[in-house]
Amino acid sequence: MQKKTLLLSSLALLGLAFQSMLTVQAADYPTKAIELIVPVGAGGGTDLSARTFAKHAQKLLGKPVVIVNINGAAGYNGSRTVREDKSDGYKVLYTHQGLITTYLTKVAPYSYDAFKPGPMIAEDPSMGLFVSSKSSIKTIQDLIAKTKAEPGRLKAATEFGGVTYFMLLKLQQEQGIKFNLIDVGGDSAKVTALLSGFVDLMPRVYFGAQDYIKSGDFVLLGQAGATRANNAAEVPTYKEQGVDFTFPAYKWSLFFSENTPQEVINRWDEVARTVTASPAFQKDMQKLGILPAYHTPEQAKAAYAEIQTLFTELSAEDAKK
Amino acid sequence: MMDVFAQAFINVIQPASLGLMFLGVGVGIIFGSIPGLSAAMAIALFLPMTFSMGPEAGMTLLVSLYIGAISGGLISAILLNIPGTPSSISTCFDGAPMAARGEAAKALGLGIVFSFLGGLLSFIALIFIAPPLAQLTLKFSPIEYFAVSIFALTMIAALSSGSMIKGLLSGMLGLMFSTVGLAPIDGSARFTLSIDSLSSGFDLLAVLIGLFAVTEVLQGVERTLSDGNAKVIALQKIRGFGFSMAEFLAQKWNLLRSSLIGIFIGILPGIGGSTSGILAYIAAKKQSKHPEKFGTGIPDGIVASETANNATIGGALVPLLALGIPGDGVTAMMLGGFMIHGLTPGPLLFKTNADFVYGIFAACLVANVIMLMLEFFGLRIYVKLLKIPKYLLMPVIIVLCTVGAFSVNSQVFNVWCILLFGVIGYLMVKGGLPIAPAILGFILGPLVETNLRRGLMLTEGNFLGFLERPIALTFLVVAVLALVVPLFSAYTQHRRSTALKPA
């Protein structure tokens, strides 16, 4: 018994010592280069916004912030690397609600709440529905009417288990309509699919697709924010057009391994607040069509909780059918 | 158009720009020639550097890296029998035997010149007919991709010189390994043995390094141990590019055919450029009057492979520039490079940023010439690689492969993969199984499966729907013929020979 107590108390002491060691380290954090883990390949919106953020953040942190692309398994490879890392704040995850979708599709055994949340950095609320200009559908009402008349006929491009998939589920369930959901792959594959006409509908963010509207290839049926997004100010919302359909924005945040000291997270919170407020960062992000959007770690956590509740309900409802 | 183009040329041949291109092509060649480092890695590494440059300078650098790296793969393919990049797998087939005969310089010379010509033809196609060519991209739905992939799979039979059974066995092994990881579309885990690292499956580059590089090193060790001193290959004197005008002219149709295959594969975003060399090699072999000589070290094989893989570059830029659609990892990063400079990729890029697009065209043409120059002078240095004793060279290769495998994804898991596939490759060679069909199976397996499932979604589960589309139908029919005709002719030959025998 005594032995056991001794063992326990020494373990506790060891734990305390370890904890204080981390705190000491945290006080002069960072002392070396930090890896910002991006769970997708180089070149896309997530990667480019992470690079932009890193460029500005390292000036404030005084140490290099290095982008490390760890793609594969829909982002699970990258998130796992951060989660399993020793919690000293030198491997930080930069991602969006893909963290939730990989959990709901059972690719990853955990969701956003397996991490200590960091500040939110950016968002893109300009999710919209695109149709071909050759289509008879010109408005969101046309789309709903046509789908009601012929349920399951219209082919909607998506990526099963991805964010656009949940967007289409929400539209289907709220409006009582049904699409023929076609998995075509990522954003550029969706554009190809709609251009070549083998799908009728494509959910996508506005930026990067606006030239297809100008060229007369695509028609955008509106955006799914509650109000017009700053990066798509010329696009009316569905609400404005009399259809009550909204969908949460892409939200990019920092995520830390579970036992990361609070000091480290506070430091990043401060850095994120300063960076997102700086005109230079805002100007760089504008080129990517992504909006700087600072939120505290608590606010970020609440936002993801809301998205997870929504997505869980959507997939539960879908499974019933 | 011409004055915009002329202006773009003048910009590109400014000293600063030229310097950047020499740097890009040079670094690209190094990345390409080192097994384990690929074109994609070179571009990923330099991408952040381009952010601080102007858009033209940035793109010039990326294009130079791309051209250098795809071509550089031929150096190790020929001299070491290890493909430097996935694109140069089929360069090994005839390049290595030719080098083993002491004609390394000739093999390199052919590879270099035809890399240049394949690239040149594809850039000409890109410059003059990109918009109509891009329409081809739009003709391909998952159904067509499925048909093309099935067609390409039947080519495994053509790759298996000697025993058909062994070729098919090897191809099956490749297909099997490609099923590990998350299933396409639904993402359910297959054969992951509850190992987290397996959930993304085996990485192509890791499999490639394992099957080719590690296997080759293991064999090299075995040879050295048994021979005592590995024989020194006598090098012939190098004149020019090491081959004659007659030898060059004999390849004109091969050049044309392989370029077309390369451009075609490049234009289709769903296929992946690494297969273009292999497919062109097979096509050359099938069209040849002496198919049995393929694999023994003839110019035709090197020409087909190297022409096609560089022609893929121009092809891959077609949908990127004309439609804003990146075909692979490399062009996806270039797209990122556009965006960071505030250029919107899409159908209007030609209209709104013509000077930029023509800048890229000019950069392609000039970088291609720089590639030719650097490799022409490099040729004399590369062949010296053969003089390095194997006991020094092999460990260095293994180190580079390990670094390359790790840097694929910053995961140590990939390092174990190259070891695993090295042993598998070694056992395959010992068992007389050819390795190339396994790689083809590994690349094509996921393409066939994913596009079959996507295609079935489009036809609402109806297989017959696949036959209603002319392009798909054509490829499927040719695929069936490719399988049936050799079997049939083998059968009739067999009957004739048995009939001739007295009962």
Image (cartoon, grey):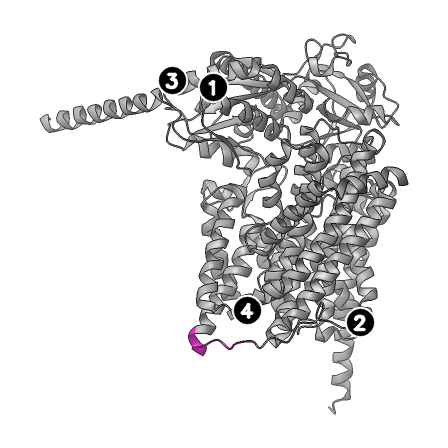
Q: Tell if the residue under mark 4 belongs to the same chain as the one under mark 2.
A: yes
Q: Is residue A104 left or right of residue B469?
A: left
Residue labelled with disc 2: B245
- Callout 1: residue from which chain? A
- Callout 2: residue from which chain? B
Residue lying at 69% horizontally and 18% vertically, measured from the top left: A126
Front tag of 1 and 2: 2
Q: Tell if the residue under mark 1 belongs to the same chain as the one under mark 2.
A: no
Q: Quadrant of the N terminus of chain B?
A: top right
The percent coordinates of residue B26 (x first, y second) are 63, 51
Q: Looking at numbered disc 1 in the image, what kind of residue is underneath it?
A: Gly
- B291 or A21, nearer to the observer: A21
SS label for mark 3: helix
What is the CA distance from the residue labelled 1 to the residue labelled 2? 66 Å
Image height of B65 relative to B257, above or below = above
Image height of A151 relative to A40, above or below = above
SS label for mark 2: helix
- B265 or A29, nearer to the observer: A29
